[in-house]
Image: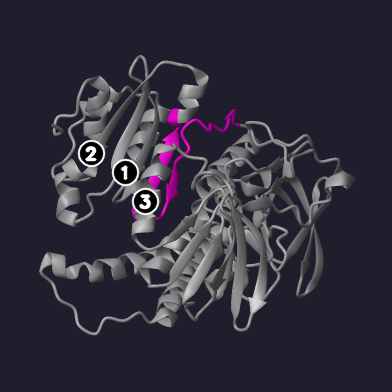
Amino acid sequence: MAYKVGVLGGGPGGYVCALKAAQLGLSVVLIEGEQLGGTCLNRGCIPTKALVKSADLWREIGHAPEFGLYVGDKRVDYQAVVARKEQVVNSLVGGVEKLMKAANIRVIKGWGEFKQLGHISVRTVNGEEDLEVENVVLATGSTPVRIPIPGADLPGVVTSDEILDITDMPKSLVIIGGGVIGLEFASIYQAFGVKVSVVEMLPSLLPTIDEEIPKRITPLLKRNGIDIFTKTLVKQISQAGESLLVQIEDAKGVKEISTDCVLLSTGRRPNLRGIDVNGLGLEIDKGAIKVNSKMETNLPNVYAIGDVVGGIMLAHVASAEGIIAVEQIAGHSVEMSYRAIPSAIFTHPEIATVGLSEQELKASGVDYRVSKFPFSANGKALALGESIGLVKILANHEGVVIGASIMGPQASTLISELVIAIEKGLLAEDIARTVHAHPTLPEAVMEAAHGILGKPLHLA
């Protein structure tokens, strides 16, 4: 049987692409070597958020007396925490499998190889099968980067994939890399009482977002007991009995940190496994498959989506790109827009951003307006006992929203209103004049929008 669409990779890009193809009436086959859901569902977004919830709940229990509540026999059963994480993952994987079945999508569990236009070969436990496919969508994702540090291959040195399999909570953890993944794990393990150190070679944590946010959250992390080392290189990792020694160097010299576990959190790289790049003549740019705004590669009827194309390596971006690719295959004239891509960071407190940062606007030399509203002036945040942080909105000289950052309670949810504003070119006035329910956290967004017009209402 020939298929209209063959999708190589069943992550959030690949399986969403397959679902959309089925909705559009296209015959589709999906090839995945491991579990459906890819890194996001199995080793990334979902399992870490399950751990985040446990960590947040443990934090709340610690603050219960502030609310007049007293809890006895407090303890962390980390194996039970991990078991719940697995339950959440398995439930969602099962849900995706049911979606595939309901949409009559053929799913093949096996390792696919793309060596010839119009064909994907799949190696399964039952042998090898050659699939005839009119259009190929490459959605093979990414893998963690293992930086070449001496000792990086020692037992106890793990990536973001492997740390999720640990069932015995370490007493101490050194995280190499102060980006999104590193800080999320730092917040999780610190909440459970682990001694956490974060080592970042750049001058700031979270270097890709609005610089005001790292400046605000870094002292909060330190106050919570996390050791932060910026402008610091990792020289080597060595074994010292049952512990690991991480040798670091900054302007003050060399020092060593003793730890039970080391997390390498230094980014991810596109996964080109199974793709005969040279034989096909597939164009690559900086290790990623090069595509245009329609997710087309340089080869006819070959598309690529998600982490394998580099750029913004986020699950929701992969899903959006998958929809664009298959709509293009179906004959629709569509293009992918990256103007309003939200990013959510599940630290404590949460962080979310969208659009341009203030340093980008300063560097461009354009006129802009900025408004900030603190959660300490929001009634719902005070009632929740989570009043640290702010909403920051950036607008152009006409008052059109072009960037936003939130640090505080439920930032990952609150950012959606500002994503829509940027995508649709709304004015800050449009947000300010929209009636928001009271008392709610979104009122902080409304107040920041008022600030673009002049001044927030509930801020002296």
Q: Using residue 297 as the reference point, say whether residue 74 is left or right of it.
A: left
Mark 2, Cα crowd under 10 Å, few <14 / some 14-19 / many 20+, is many
Number of the label disc, if any, that sits on residue 352: none
Q: Residue furthest left?
A: 68
Of helix, strand and loop, which one carries label 2?
Answer: helix
Cα–Cα gap, marks 3 and 2? 23 Å
- Please, what is the three-letter code of the amino acid marked with disc 2? Ala
Mark 1 touches mark 2? (CB < 8 Å): yes
Mark 1, Cα crowd under 10 Å, few <14 / some 14-19 / many 20+, is some
Residue identifier under label 2: 444
Q: Is residue 356 magenta?
A: yes
- Please, what is the three-letter code of the amino acid marked with disc 1? Leu
Cα–Cα gap, marks 1 and 2? 9 Å
Q: Which residues are magenta?
A: 332-358
225, 13: nearer the viewer: 225
Q: Using residue 370 as the reference point, say whether residue 204 is left or right of it.
A: right
Q: Earlier in the sequence, mark 3 or mark 1?
A: 3
Number of the label disc, if any, that sits on residue 414: 1
